[in-house]
Image: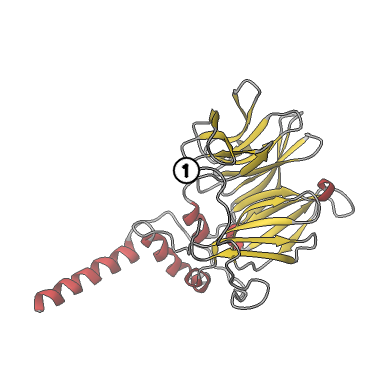
């Protein structure tokens, strides 16, 4: 019995020392999120509307991020760097390219070329011959850390894309979320001049990007702040920004516009009560960062998508808690 107690004491001391003293590059900043909205009732109420959805493509497609639907097929980027075109039943699959990085966001330019936001390689294009061409890898002298998503305006003049975190690279999203350092950016690439402009900075993990009606504004998900921000491109508000929707019930990831009257936002996971409660306490969040070295990310697996109208109001709520796929 004494040996068991001694072992328990030693184990507690070792774990405590690890959580308190283990070196970490994560330096959390204090912030206070608004109380999470209810998922018991209201517009975010728990439901199983995604439970019986049809799987498109083969189950062995590893890590599809953005999905570009074209002519009865889908194009997506995979964990291993490949960009593929797959029939909807998954029986026919064509390799378009291998970026050698991590292709995430995809957008089709009006001239036909495919533009790729690659988490490791920056903003790329794929020409008709299958050649990958680097477009841009930095803005204002700051290299992209985690190029995430991209959208192209109707004229083909500009690509709008996100750098999730200039400090934390691809695969370090957990560290970026815990640190809450505001090092994400919304950027614009000019296809004619080749120049890259910073539209918004100090974003909390800039993620999904999409353009609104008539390309009047661009939306960007701030995963670490549970909100979607808007940057106005035309009209009296051009050059200004505001919040499109705030205090979401989860972490917004991908974002898309149906071209008419609805935005779709996919939530990576519901909010985590522990992360919210420790947000004002950097010391505790630093211990969580240390724990994440050996423990999995503290996120709940849940299928979760929201439909938003043009005013940012929730008009659709699709969930499935039984399977986070």
Q: Is residue 140 visible?
A: no
Front-lying residue, 307 or 157: 307
Drawn side of residue 227 relative to residue 118, left or right: right
Reply above or below: 250 against 109: below
Q: Is residue 202 left or right of residue 100?
A: right
Q: Residue furthest left?
A: 2
Residue furthest toward the right?
A: 236
Tell me which residue sits at (84%, 51%) in the image. Answer: 238
Res 97 seen here:
yes
- Determine whether 316 is above or below 197 in the image: below
* SS at badge 1: loop
Does 47 sit above or below residue 173? below
Q: Is residue 303 above or below residue 147?
A: below
Instruction: Name the quadrant of the N terminus.
Output: bottom left
Provide the residue designation for mark 1: 62
How does the figure colour the protein chain or chains?
Answer: secondary structure
- Residue visible at 36% across and 60% down in the picture: 295
Image coords of residue 205 (percent x, y): 58, 54
Q: Residue at x 73, y 51 (%)?
A: 257
Bin the neighbour count of mark 1 within 10 Å (Cα to Cα): few under 14, some 14-19, many 20 and up: few
Residue 125 on image: x %, y %: 64, 30
Q: Count up the numbered dots.
A: 1
Q: Nearer the viewer, residue 118 or 321?
A: 321
Q: Which of these two is toward me, 16 or 292?
A: 292
């Amino acid at each position: 019995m004494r040996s068991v107690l001694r072992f328990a004491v030693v184990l507690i001391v070792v774990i405590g020392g690890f959580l308190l003293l283990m070196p970490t590059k994560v330096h959390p900043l204090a912030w206070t999120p608004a109380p999470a909205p209810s998922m018991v009732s209201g517009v975010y109420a728990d439901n199983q509307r995604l439970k019986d959805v049809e799987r498109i493509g083969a189950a062995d497609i590893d890590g599809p991020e953005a999905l570009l639907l074209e002519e009865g097929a889908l194009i997506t980027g995979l964990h291993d760097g490949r960009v593929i075109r797959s029939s909807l039943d998954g029986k026919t699959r064509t390799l378009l390219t291998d970026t050698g990085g991590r292709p995430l966001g995809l957008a089709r330019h009006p001239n036909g070329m495919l533009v790729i936001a690659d988490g490791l390689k920056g903003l790329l294009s794929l020409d008709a011959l299958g050649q990958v061409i680097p477009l841009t890898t930095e803005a204002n002298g700051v290299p992209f850390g985690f190029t995430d998503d991209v959208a192209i305006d109707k004229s083909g003049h500009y690509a709008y894309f996100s750098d999730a975190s200039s400090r934390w690279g691809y695969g370090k999203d957990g560290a970026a979320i815990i640190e809450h350092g505001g090092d994400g950016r919304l950027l614009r690439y000019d296809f004619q001049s080749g120049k890259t402009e910073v539209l918004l900075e100090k974003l909390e993990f800039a993620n999904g990007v999409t353009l609104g009606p008539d390309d009047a504004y661009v939306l960007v998900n701030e995963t670490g702040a549970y909100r979607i921000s808007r940057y106005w491109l035309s009209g009296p508000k051009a050059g200004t920004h505001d919040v499109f929707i705030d205090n979401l019930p989860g972490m917004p990831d991908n974002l898309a516009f149906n071209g008419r009257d609805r935005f779709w936002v996919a939530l990576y996971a519901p909010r985590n009560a522990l992360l919210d409660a420790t947000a004002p306490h950097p010391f505790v969040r630093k211990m969580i960062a240390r724990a994440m070295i050996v423990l999995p990310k503290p996120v709940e697996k849940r299928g979760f998508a929201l439909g938003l109208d043009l005013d940012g109001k929730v008009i659709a709520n699709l969930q499935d808690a039984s399977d986070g796929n």
